[in-house]
Image (cartoon, helix red, strand yellow):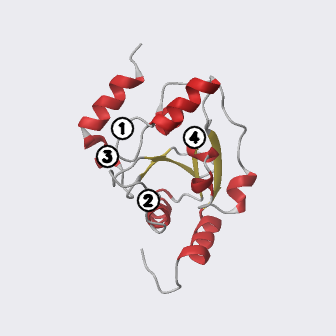
Amino acid sequence: RPSIDARCERDFSDRRHLEAYQCGSLRYEYHDTPRKEVFFHIANRISPKSIFDDPIYLPCCFMILMEHVEAMCQAEYITTFTWLNSYPRWLSLFPREWDDNMSEPSTDVEWHYGYWGQFITARGTFNEKLGEFTRQHGRLKFYPRGSKCSIAVMRRHLADKYFTADMKF
């Protein structure tokens, strides 16, 4: 089975995979379901800076994402499954509905960035601090969780927290 090391090395040296990210550091995929949900992925398109360095960067990415998926997919909800759903800085972006819909942490580790992304720094190097935590404790510090919220609630939350009424996306 391929190792995460090979994938990290490939992704670090070949950044073309980021071209698929339609909304800054967010990428969506739509599956036609009765719930009108759109799943989104997260990657760092602004490396070597962190997606958290500029407090307005991710809210802008989300506003663009929501505009896209409403227009193109008639989506009503956004959803994802990521280790970031256990990370306080990420969670501060979301309304209460996101927290209310949060799944339990998934401790059955799988081979994808939903688990392993936490070991990659903004610069694309190994996160020594989290590596050391895992070696000392024999577990991940942040386990992925799934959640969702309505686009209407998310838009209102971001508008109230980050934007003025006259801003357009």
Check residue 72 in the rendering and tell me which mark sits there, or answer none. Answer: 2
Check residue 125 in the rendering and tell me which mark sits there, or answer none. Answer: 1
Q: Residues within 10 Å of mark 2 (few under 14, many from 20)?
A: few
State which quadrant residue 115 falls in: top right
Which of the two labelled residues, at mark 1 and mark 3, occupies the earlier sequence position? Answer: 3
What residue is at 73 percent from the left and 38 percent from the top? 104
Residue 158 in percent (x, y) is at: 57, 70
- Camera-nearest label, 1 or 2: 1
Which of the two labelled residues, at mark 1 and mark 4, occupies the earlier sequence position? Answer: 4
Check residue 33 in the rendering and tell me which mark sits there, or answer none. Answer: none
Q: Nearer the viewer, residue 49 or 110?
A: 49
Residue 20 in percent (x, y) is at: 33, 47
Q: Secondary structure at mark 2?
A: helix
Q: Which residue is mark 4?
A: 83
Which of the two labelled residues, at mark 3 and mark 2, occupies the earlier sequence position? Answer: 3
| Amino acid type of the residue that numbered disc 1 sits on in the rendered structure | Thr
Are the residues flagged by discs 1 and 3 in contact, CB closer than 8 Å? no
Q: Secondary structure at mark 1?
A: loop
In the image: residue 119, left or right of residue 99:
left
Marks 1 and 3, how far apart at CA:
17 Å
Which of the two labelled residues, at mark 1 and mark 2, occupies the earlier sequence position? Answer: 2
Marks 1 and 2, how far apart at CA:
35 Å
- Camera-nearest label, 1 or 3: 1
Which of the two labelled residues, at mark 4 and mark 2, occupies the earlier sequence position? Answer: 2
Which of the two labelled residues, at mark 3 and mark 4, occupies the earlier sequence position? Answer: 3
| Amino acid type of the residue that numbered disc 3 sits on in the rendered structure | Leu
What residue is at 35 percent from the left and 31 percent from the top? 8
Q: Secondary structure at mark 3?
A: helix
- Camera-nearest label, 1 or 4: 1
Marks 4 and 2, how far apart at CA:
28 Å
Marks 3 and 2, how far apart at CA:
21 Å
Q: Nearer the viewer, residue 130 or 58?
A: 130
